[in-house]
Image (tube, rainbow, N blue to C red):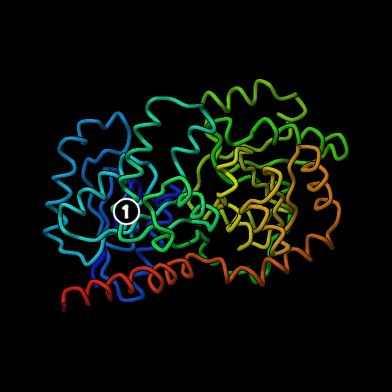
Amino acid sequence: MKLVLCWPNFEPTNAAGVRGRSFAMHLGALGWDVHAITMPDARAADAAPCPVETMPLFLHPRHWPAAFGGTGRLARRLKELRPDVVVASSPPSTFAWQAGRAAARAGVPYVADVRDLFTAGMRAVFGDKPRYVVAEGLESRFYRDAAAVCTATGLMGEKLARDFPEVEAGRVHTVPNGADPVDRPRMPPPRDLDVLFVGEMFDRGRRGEELLDAYARVLKHRPQTRFTFVGWEKNPYTDSLLASASKEVRAALDLHGRVARAEVARFSWRARCGVVPVHPADVFRTMLPAKAYEYVQSEVPIVGLGPPGDSELRRFVEGNDLGAFTTTPEAMAEAILGFLTSERERMRVGDNARRAAPTFTRARAAERLHKDVLVPLLERGGEARRA
């Protein structure tokens, strides 16, 4: 069984790359001959679990020349590789649309893997703009022509089916994210990091202002608290966050840049709690950030900040008793203080996380993709050829 991953980013420190690499590794273990095609990147092939090749494709508006030649180039390569199926990742909509068109031109069925609802999310954060109308049209084409659509959460699949009537519910499957299992240290390190955030801060959708508001409230009751960011990069948004923060908050921040995924566990095993902010707009109810899975693997209580009402983050945290779900900075500060001051509560939630961790692994996600989507797709194709 031969499979090509058409993946926008395949480097080991990128969230999209981590998901693609995980599929490559675990599907390979399940018997697939996996080959990856991605954008040119110096790190795309670093310690890759499968053969990787790069070619210019339409990832970002600045890559617009690839909109005219990239589809044919990719289609020709797919004809040479002759895979049984292509799995193409979204977002962004431009790359996904081009990968889907190339697969169709090569006569290969493709599966649309959807990590988040890109266009709806952009609209929620930045407002309606003409380019999002174009992006939504590209997404629609990508979903419409796919043999199957896989979404990272169940609520995401429900919303996609509502927003795109051309996508029949029967073609939509949930293939969640997850985290690679982390070996529990024989002697776990002391939990000497108070509050941990893993991820990037690059726009208001990350709720940085509310995080720092919650941190300021924590400091009023526990002035010695430290707040660790892993993935902090200097950009206009992070500059504005630091400029608007009080000197007490700035002094309490420990800022670290991007690190390899293996290094994330070294931070999370030391954390007393990990925060997961989710934008309050309706579309983000469907999303569950990957950092939540990583915290679980390291037995870290989660403090979520999300919209009121139902959401994937609330379901994950409350349904598995993995921490506290909150909707305001005030409630978030209270929950953080609860975990910082009660070792018993940290241990109780950590025990729940240890029991839940095997359920939320990337290997399980790949097994689901294999069993629920790829094998049935090949079986249907085989029956059609015999007929």
Residue 238 locus on image (x, y percent): 58, 28
Say whether residue 187 is left or right of residue 31: right
Residue 192 locus on image (x, y percent): 73, 52
Say whether residue 157 is left or right of residue 272: left
Q: Disc 1 residue type? A: Ala
Name the secondary structure under disc 1: strand
| Front residue of this view, candidates 217 and 286 | 286
Q: Is residue 280 above or below residue 234?
A: below
Residue 70: quadrant of the picture: top left
| Front residue of this view, candidates 272 and 349 | 349
Residue at left offset 68%, top offset 66% = 353
Residue at left offset 74%, top offset 46% = 326
Residue 300 locus on image (x, y percent): 69, 58
Residue 234 locus on image (x, y percent): 52, 29
| Total numbered labels | 1
Q: Is residue 381 above or below residue 166?
A: below
Q: Is residue 375 above or below residue 315?
A: below
Residue at left offset 55%, top offset 42% = 283
| Farthest right residue in view | 221
Residue 243: quadrant of the picture: top right
- Image quarter (top left, top right, bottom left or bottom right) of the C terminus: bottom left
| Front residue of this view, candidates 252 and 143 | 143
- Image quarter (top left, top right, bottom left or bottom right) of the N terminus: bottom left
To which residue does mark 1 refer? 88
Q: Is residue 365 above or below residue 332?
A: below
